Image (cartoon, grey):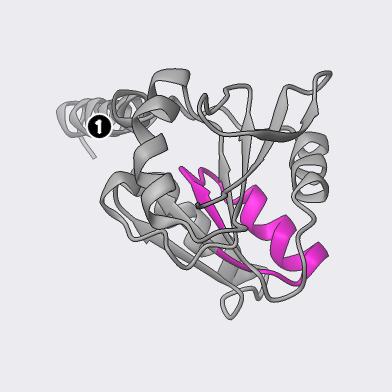
Amino acid sequence: MDYLTATLLFVIITTLLLLSIQWPGLTGAPWWPTPQKKVLRMLEMANVQADEVVYDLGCGDGRVLIAAARRFQARSVGIEIDPLRFVLVQILITILGLRKRITVKLGNFFEQDLSQADIVFTYLLQNTNNKLFNKLDGELHPGTRVVSHNYSYPGWRLIDEDETLGLYLYEVVKP
């Protein structure tokens, strides 16, 4: 490989990586992995049961999906807008043998049907939560639990909170 080809390849790969890092931030929230301790606490707060359907909006590397499937025997659905992370999580769930319990969709969660969720996890920005509120309120069935990391959902009744870890648990209630 000559110098010009190597340089061009480096520029293309670097550009793709930078776009991969920035793209989710422009559409909902930047990718920032949730520490495993918080993932487990979020799942415990939500009282995840076997065969419930857990959605992770902006699933990143799939750690919430994987923990829900392995530890709680839940079925997990992730939605990821970043093609690179989407491919990486597909590889990971295949290697871990979790393909029957985990589905990951490539796309914008604002454009996905969330009505099958029993539990929804979000680690987004406050303005994204504010925009997402009406979609969740309209699509989720009564009793669906919504767990948010660091940012709240004003307008819903908070049913549990871990102030130390910045976690909030809501339950959808319909009149």
Question: In the picture, residue 113 is in which quadrant?
Answer: bottom left
Give the magenta-colored segment's residue range: 55-76
Q: Residue at x 35, y 47 (%)?
A: 109
Taking the image as shown, residue 112 lies to the left or right of residue 116, namely left
| Magenta-colored stretch includes residue 65 | yes
Taking the image as shown, residue 160 lies to the left or right of residue 23, namely right
Residue 90 seen from this side: yes
Nearest the eye: 50 or 18 = 50
* Relative to 54, residue 81 above or below: above
| Magenta-colored stretch includes residue 47 | no
* Relative to 19, residue 146 above or below: below
Taking the view exactly as shown, the residue that stands out farthest to the bottom is 100
Q: Which residue is mark 1?
A: 6
Q: Could you tell me residue 26's position as x and y percent?
A: 29, 24
Residue 82 seen from this side: no
Nearest the eye: 132 or 28 = 132
Locate the N terminus by quadrant.
Answer: top left
Nearest the eye: 47 or 39 = 47
Mark 1 lies on a secondary structure that is helix
Taking the image as shown, residue 157 lies to the left or right of residue 82, namely right
Q: Residue at x 28, y 33 (%)?
A: 16
Q: Could you tell me residue 32's position as x and y percent?
A: 56, 27
* Relative to 97, residue 154 above or below: above
Specify the amino acid type for callout 1. Ala
Nearest the eye: 141 or 57 = 141
Q: Residue at x 52, y 62 (%)?
A: 117
Q: Could you tell me residue 148's position as x and y percent?
A: 61, 34
Classed neighbour count for the residue bearing mark 1: other residues with Cα under 10 Å, few (<14), some (14–19), many (≥20):
few
